[in-house]
Image (spheres, grey):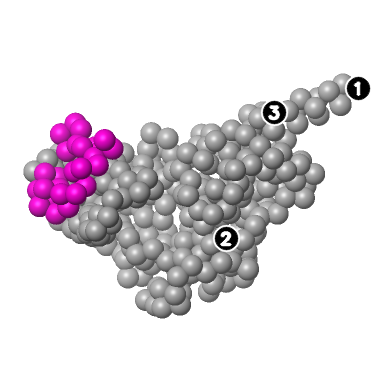
């Protein structure tokens, strides 16, 4: 009787968690056909999803695959909305557990971290290692070749499973059930029966190591899923601790597969390239991109996370500004001969505030003012106004 009561309590909590995951997924949902269909009867759909999860019958649905060109060309797999609910459920259960295992200077997909934190940390490292720019120091920047497509699913799942079993005292959910969802998410072949959105020509110019359609057996995670971001951090966590604890590199930071080491000795940093390469290949089956190795004096600065970090100043990279300009041009096309609808207004707000948010962290007041008044169509000013000194658009 006690066991039944305990199971019922667990089941009630799971149902609450499924509903919470739904509300989290809905916050950032696109108005796709399957999202709208789910929303029309969301309670019925959530109970159905809950029954599938608790019975062990849940299976991921078909994904939609397409290409985006900004900020760089990427292949995206958009999961079915019900699968996105499951992704949020997994994330809500395990993200806080794994976050405690990450080093401070792992910046991706973490509350209170992110690109701006990473940029500030690298700036601080440069100042510290060079003793406020008075001594020589060198910056080594590396990244992984085709990172998400190279992630070994078996290695990843074992890492997650081992860590969760070690953290049993922190777990207040059904571990076997959640591991089942994680396993099905990781090993799901997103390319199988996927819906291709766009033309075959969209894939032209995309390297094979950037596509799930060309990965090695049992490798690759789809870019576009919330879980992929978290799993990508988990996969490199062992490498982070190796750099910090074994190699004892004080000045080190990583955002996804883009990482930086700063040291007073150029010779030592150069010797580390082979050491790091061997560790990544033997432990994680990853390869350092041979054409993206950058080792130079701190005075030349470093381009990192959309910014250029130099002594005494940080400014926005040209590519980021170019993408902002291209976004404005695309938005201007919407209002050439008609009024924007609600979704288009939301897209305008989301896109513009994203770039303004990035720029507002740096000394870009004049740049923001010039970009908006010289390039943004006057028609948009009929529907939105600026707040906070060129920092944020608000719909009228």
- State which region is magenta: 368-396
- As drawn, the residue found furthest toward the front would be 338
Query: Which residue is nearer to you in this view: 271 or 153?
Result: 153
Q: Which residue is mark 3?
A: 13
The x and y percentages for residue 367 are: 11, 47
Residue 205: quarter of image = bottom left
The residue at 63%/68% (across/down) is 192
Q: Quarter holding the C terminus? A: top left
Q: Nearer the viewer, mark 2 or mark 3?
A: 2
Give the image location of residue 27, x and y in percent: 47, 39
- Mark 1 or mark 2, earlier in chain: 1
Residue 50 lies in what quarter of the image?
A: top right
Whether residue 348 appears in this view of the structure is yes
Q: Secondary structure at mark 1?
A: loop
- In space, the residues marked 1 and 2 are separated at their CA atoms by 43 Å
The residue where tag 1 is placed is: 1
Circle on res. 241: none
Task: Write down the residue under mark 2.
Answer: 63
Horizontal side of 286 relative to 387 (left or right) equals: right
């Amino acid at each position: 009787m006690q066991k039944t009561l305990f199971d019922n309590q667990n089941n009630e909590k799971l149902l609450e968690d499924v509903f919470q995951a739904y509300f989290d997924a809905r916050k950032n949902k696109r108005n796709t056909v399957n999202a709208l269909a789910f929303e029309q009867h969301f309670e019925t759909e959530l109970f159905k999803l809950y029954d599938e999860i608790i019975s062990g019958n849940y299976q991921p649905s078909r994904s939609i695959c397409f290409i985006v060109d900004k900020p760089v060309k990427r292949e995206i797999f958009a999961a079915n909305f019900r699968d996105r609910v499951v992704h949020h459920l997994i994330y809500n259960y395990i993200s806080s557990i794994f976050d405690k295992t990450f080093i401070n200077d792992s910046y991706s997909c973490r509350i209170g971290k992110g690109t701006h934190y990473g940029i500030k940390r690298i700036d601080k490292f440069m100042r510290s290692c060079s003793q406020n720019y008075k001594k020589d120091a060198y910056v080594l920047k590396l990244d992984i070749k085709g990172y998400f497509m190279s992630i070994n699913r078996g290695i990843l799942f074992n890492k997650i499973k081992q860590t969760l079993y070690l953290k049993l005292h922190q777990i207040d959910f059904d571990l076997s059930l959640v591991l089942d969802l994680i396993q099905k998410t990781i090993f799901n072949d997103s390319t199988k029966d996927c819906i291709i959105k766009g033309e075959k020509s969209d894939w032209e110019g995309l390297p094979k190591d950037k596509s799930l359609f060309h990965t090695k057996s049992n490798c690759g995670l789809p870019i576009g899923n919330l879980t992929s971001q978290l799993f990508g951090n988990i996969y490199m966590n062992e490498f982070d601790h190796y750099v910090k604890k074994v190699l004892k590199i004080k000045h080190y930071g990583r955002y996804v597969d883009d990482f930086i080491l700063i040291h007073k000795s150029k010779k030592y940093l150069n010797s580390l390239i082979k050491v790091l390469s061997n560790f990544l290949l033997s432990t994680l089956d990853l390869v350092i991109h041979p054409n993206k190795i950058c080792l130079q004096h701190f005075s030349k600065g470093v381009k990192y996370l959309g910014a250029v970090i130099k002594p005494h100043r940080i400014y926005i990279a040209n590519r980021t500004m170019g993408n902002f300009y291209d976004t404005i041009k695309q938005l201007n096309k919407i209002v050439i001969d008609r009024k924007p609808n609600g979704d288009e207004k939301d897209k305008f707000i989301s896109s513009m505030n994203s770039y303004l948010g990035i720029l507002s962290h740096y000394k870009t007041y004049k740049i923001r003012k010039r970009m908006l008044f010289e390039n943004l169509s006057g028609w948009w000013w009929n529907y939105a106004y600026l707040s906070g000194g060129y920092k944020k658009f608000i719909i009228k």
